[in-house]
Each structure stands twice: as C-alpha cells, then as structure tokens.
Image: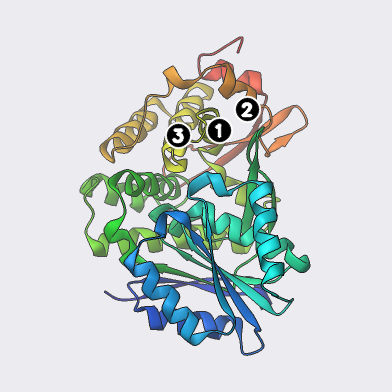
C-alpha cells in the first residue's frame, strides 16, 4: 500500500499527516525526526483498550528503542479518560517521571486518547510538543488532525480545551484490521461529514461500496477526509470563521452523545446529528428533502444509527443550550445546501427545536 502525505499548512508550525501501513521502526523514525534531537524524554499516553494489542506493543518497543526517556502511561479507554481529574493524574505522572519543557508526548489510540494527550501537552509546563498515532478510523480522519484538544464536563462534551498543534500525525492503517465493526462504522460518519461539507465525491464512493471497504478505498477515504480538514484548518486554525463547518452534525450530535452517558460512540452521535442538520436545513429551505433522504439512506447503508426522533428528549435539548458554539442567545449551526457545500446560520435553541418537530422543548 502506498503512503499518502497530507500537509497541514500553518507556516512555521506546518506538519504532516502520513497515511499508510507502516512498520513500527518507520513510525519511530518519523516521530524522532518531527521532535528533533533536543528532545529530552518522550511520554507515551496509550489507549487502555490497546493494553493487550500486539501491534501496539511492537510500536511501543520501537519508540523506546529510538527515542530518549520513553515511558508508557495507559489511559482509561474512551471518554472515561476525558476529564479534568484524569488530566491531573497524567500531569502528576509526567512530573513524577521528570519530564521537562523539552519533553514530548505521543498519544496512541482513539480520538479520546489523542484529545487527552494533546490537552496534556498544551498545559503541561505551559506547553510541550506532541505527536499523535491514531488507531481508529474516527481518530485518523477527525480527532487527531487540526490541533483541537480537550476534555469533557458533566455539562457537555469538549467544553474545556486548547488549540495545540501536533508535530506529526501518523495514521497507521494497519491498526484498522482489528477494529470492531461498530467502531469502523462510527469512523465513517466523520468521513461522510467531509463529503457533505466539502468533497461530494466521498458520498459517491461510500454509496458505491457500502460498509465493506477495501484497504485501498479506506486509504483514499481517509486521505480525502484529512485533506478537507487540513485545508479548513490552514485557513482558519482557531475557528473564528470557516472552521466551524467541521461542526456539521455536531451540535445535536454532541448533545445526544453526552445525554447517552457516552453509550453512543462519537461517530454514531454525529450520524444522528447530520440527520438533524439535513432535516432542519430542508425545513428552513436551505437544503432539500431529497438531500435529507439521501443522507439518511447512506448512513443507514453504512450501519450507522438514523433513528433521531425517538432520542430527542429533554436531556438532549438541555445540553444543546450549553453548546460551545453558542453566541449569546443563538448557536452557530452548520447546514448543507447541497453536497460539497456548507452554510453557517445563527439559530436559537427554540428555532432548532421547532425545526426538528419539538416545539416547546
């Protein structure tokens, strides 16, 4: 399998997203080059779900052999690691191991792990360098790229965080071979999102293939989704404008995810959130009923949930009101007029509720 390199153009902080199937030693060399020779130690923050994973063990061994001062710290799996309490534990461990301002962090795992690792790097000693090695499809196309890091509060998802760009992202597609079908499907939701907002060819490719994707098609879809995100981030790093389109499906999605107690995977919640955005757009005259039906059909074909209406209860609406994209009394909502285009519109929670058939919520 060939290697695809997608640059994230941020001037002096430019970095690469490398996509392919890599030998552990090649990953270690790439990370070492990205960090540079002055690095004094490297902390590996590893997804707890990878504790017994053979590929992860080989990767950790290669990093240990190539980089200075390597130590491993296993995080809780999934959203359980994304709290201020868990960040404090990581920071205390970093201090106990003697990592200084020339130290670095490598996050190995799914999106929650890379979010945690990036946030720890952003705040430890007021900021140290880090890299990510995402091991899930969702993390490869979304969480690990773009410098958004953070943790959750009881009130909602990703309400505490920082923008902190990695030195390199290595999407080793070899990890996807053992990824459970549910997590693979969840990752496709973020891929589909990029098709709706910027690259409509993604929608065509997914419709033609269904949930069983060939390795080469997976590489192409990952590369296309990463190119979309890299281009948007290069234009608007800190979400003062266009980067907000990457939140398509996330306003309602994040509320559903938090209301479920994180029983819903992030991609599953985004799938439902995209259904909400497409249906709301059709009712507002921004999109069409046909586009909403196409989205519902595609997401269902990819084994993603589409049963939105039954999930929109009071706990979901209360969480929408604390969405981090809120501006005064309105929320900046992302709509899709047609495949490959996105439109930002400021809506009140009441307008969103009424548009989704929940007036009075």
Q: Nearer the viewer, residue 35 or 145?
A: 35
Residue at point 50%, 29% (across, down): 260
Q: Position of residue 186 (x, y in %)?
A: 38, 44
Question: 10 Å neighbourhood of mark 1: few (<14), some, or many (≥20)?
Answer: many
Q: Nearer the viewer, residue 198 or 297?
A: 297
- Answer with left or right where residue 90 lies relative to residue 272: right
Of the residues tagged 2 and 3, which is closer to the observer?
3
Question: 10 Å neighbourhood of mark 2: few (<14), some, or many (≥20)?
Answer: many
Tell me the quadrant of the picture where the C terminus can be found: top right
Residue that lies at the very extreme toward the top in this rendered image: 360
> For numbered disc 3, what is the local secondary structure?
loop
Q: Position of residue 169 (x, y in %)?
A: 50, 69
Q: Is residue 315 visible?
A: yes
> For numbered disc 2, what is the local secondary structure?
helix
Residue at point 39%, 30% (across, down): 292
Residue at point 26%, 37% (across, down): 301
Identify the mark at residue 258; answer none if there is no mark.
1
Sequence-first tag of 2 and 1: 1
Count of labels in the image: 3
346 over 102 or under it: above or below:
above
Q: Nearer the viewer, residue 86 or 249?
A: 86
Residue that mark 3 sits on: 263
Of the residues tagged 2 and 1, which is closer to the observer?
1
Sequence-first tag of 1 and 3: 1
Q: Nearer the viewer, residue 262 or 165?
A: 262
Tell me the quadrant of the picture where the N terminus can be found: bottom left
Q: Position of residue 53 (x, y in %)?
A: 35, 63
Colour scheme shown: rainbow
Residue that mark 2 sits on: 319
Residue that lies at the very extreme toward the front in this rendered image: 96
């Amino acid at each position: 399998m060939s290697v695809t390199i997608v640059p994230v153009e941020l001037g002096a902080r430019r970095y690469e997203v490398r996509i392919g199937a890599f030998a552990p030693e090649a990953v270690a060399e790439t990370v070492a080059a990205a960090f540079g020779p002055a690095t004094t130690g490297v902390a590996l923050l590893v997804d707890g779900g990878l504790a017994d994973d053979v590929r992860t063990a080989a990767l950790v061994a290669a990093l240990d052999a190539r980089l200075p001062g390597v130590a491993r710290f296993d995080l809780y799996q999934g959203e359980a690691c994304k709290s201020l309490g868990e960040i404090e534990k990581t920071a205390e461990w970093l201090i106990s191991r003697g990592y200084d301002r020339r130290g670095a962090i490598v996050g190995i795992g799914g999106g929650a792990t890379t979010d945690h690792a990036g946030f720890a790097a952003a705040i430890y000693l007021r900021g140290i360098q880090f890299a990510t090695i995402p091991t899930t499809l969702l993390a490869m196309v979304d969480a690990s790229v773009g410098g958004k890091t953070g943790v959750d509060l009881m009130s909602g998802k990703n309400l505490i965080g920082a923008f902190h760009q990695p030195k390199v992202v290595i999407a080793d597609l070899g990890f996807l071979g053992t990824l459970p079908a549910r997590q693979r499907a969840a990752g496709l939701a973020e891929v589909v999102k990029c098709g709706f907002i910027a690259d409509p060819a993604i929608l065509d490719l997914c419709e033609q293939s269904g949930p069983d994707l060939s390795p080469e098609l997976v590489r192409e879809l990952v590369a296309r989704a990463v190119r979309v995100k890299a281009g948007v981030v290069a234009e608007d790093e800190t979400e003062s404008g266009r980067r907000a389109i990457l939140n398509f499906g996330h306003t309602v999605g994040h509320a559903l995810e938090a209301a479920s107690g994180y029983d819903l995977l992030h991609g599953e919640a985004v799938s439902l959130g995209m259904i909400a955005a497409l249906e709301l757009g059709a009712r507002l005259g921004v999109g069409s009923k046909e586009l909403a039906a196409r989205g519902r059909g595609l997401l269902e074909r990819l084994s993603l949930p589409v049963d939105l209406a039954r999930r929109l209860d009071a706990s979901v609406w209360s969480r929408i009101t604390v969405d981090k994209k809120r501006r005064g009394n309105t929320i900046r909502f992302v709509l899709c007029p047609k495949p490959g285009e996105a439109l930002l519109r400021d809506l009140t929670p009441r307008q969103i509720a009424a548009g989704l058939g929940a007036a009075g919520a």
